[in-house]
Image (cartoon, helix red, strand yellow):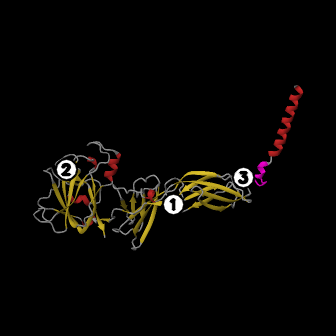
Amino acid sequence: MKIAFNLTVFLFMCLAIVGCKKYDTDYKSFLDNHEITYPGLASGFTYHAGNLRTVLVWHPSPDPSIKTYVVKWNNGRDSLKLDATSHDPADSIQLSIPNLQEYVYSFHLLTYDDKGNPSIGQDLNNVRVYGPAYQSTLLNRAYNTANPYVIHNDGSVTLNFNKADTGNVATTVKYTNKLGASEERSFVADSSSITLPDYKFGTEVQYRSSYIPVKNAADIFNALTYDKFPTIIGVAEMDKSLFKAVYLPTDVGSAYGWELYFLWDKSTNEPGFHTPGTDFPIWFTIDLGQSASLSQLKLWQRMSALYDVGNAKRFEVWGTNNTPDPSGSWNGWTQLASFTSYKPSGLPRGQNSDDDKKFAEAGEPFNFPANGLTVRYIRFKILETWGETNYFHAIEISVFKQLK
């Protein structure tokens, strides 16, 4: 029995060896007696988002046998081929894929060696392509409504804008220069203003902002349309040497030696103009010495009574281009504007901040609406003072006219 068992085991071992020898090379028949070779892979496979396109980026494979790169998408139905020109992994290869839809794609990158062997490939998923839908959401950067522009003494104009939205990279301004030619200038998102050195006053200014959808995007998107900037009217200070006091029967008088003409003596030191105590409202009249369309008024308070006592809080300015009625009536006068003095800190009476002081020292500006009305004579009607007094005082005024 023992001998028979040993013989049986021996026979099975022989059959196993014969079987292995028969099948260990059978795989070669499936590979046509060739070995499989996989070329090296690229590295750093990524992309830059674009406008109805994407820009694929990768570092070359160091495998010197690689001759070609092939990118496939849409489940392999679309592809692009690119010759390998470098095998230095420090280099960068870029391939723009055009004519895409606004969608999310997946791309498959293959390398091929000089014998046509492909790599196993690598995938790049969630590649977002941007287009009209994204562009339709873009808004132009908002201008500063409180202080949209500043006109400088040299005739240049600075346009002021609010903080830029996320993704904003620049804003382009279109305007007409002093020679009548159209011109464009741009400023970046980090800046809140742009200066136009040669703007022609009164002409239209348009602006449009540009955005990138994500960091390092391949393309910049513009807002669909330009927006209009507020009309910029050139201004110049009127010549104070032409100003004259007009004393009409119903006008308020002066007190304490603070005369009306001190309001344009080009000094912001005391004395100024001071009225006697009387029932409000009160008014007084000035001849500007020339006809003009007014743009702005600056008023300097009495600093020793800052935002208090007889400094004006609410007042109106009226105007006429005709010689005032000698009776002192309001016939022929037109209200140009109604103003309320502004206190930056908002603190109660008797409390003033450094900002309040700086604001008042510079002369508080009051802007007239651009109604085109030309006047030579102006009449101040004082309605209320900061100290709720029955008298008014001020130190200096400046009047600015629109330039045509």
The answer to which of marks 2 and 1 sits earlier in the sequence is 1
Who comes first in sequence, dot 3 or dot 1?
3
Q: Which residue is mark 3?
A: 38
Q: Position of residue 26 (x, y in %)?
A: 78, 48
Q: Mark 1 sits on what residue?
A: 52
Disc 3 from disc 1: Cα separation: 34 Å
Mark 2 lies on residue: 384
- Give the crowd class for mark 3: few <14, some 14-19, many >=20 residues within 10 Å: some
Helix, strand or loop at label 1? It is loop
Residue 66: x percent and y percent? 71, 58
Asked whether the beta carbons under mark 2 and mark 3 sit within 8 Å of each other, the answer is no
Q: Quadrant of residue 283?
A: bottom left
Callout in the foreground (2, 3):
3
Which amino acid, mark 1?
Leu
Does dot 2 land on a helix, a strand or a loop?
A: strand
- Could you tell me what secondary structure mostly forms the magenta stretch? loop
User: How many angstroms separate mark 2 from mark 3 (CA)?
Assistant: 90 Å
**Residue at image point 71% right, 52% down:** 40
Please give the name of the residue rendered at 40% of the width and 61% of the height, measured from the top-left corner: 158
The residue range painted magenta reads 26-38
The amino acid beneath tag 2 is Glu
Is residue 59 visible to the viewer in this orientation of the structure? no
- Identify the secondary structure beneath mark 3: loop
* Magenta-span inclusion, residue 144: no
Q: Is residue 350 left or right of residue 157?
A: left
Residue 53 appears anywhere in the view: yes
CB contact under 8 Å: marks 3 and 1 = no
Between 279 and 184, which is closer to the camera in this rendering? 184
Residue 164: name its quadrant: bottom left
Mark 3, mark 1: which one is toward the viewer? Answer: 3
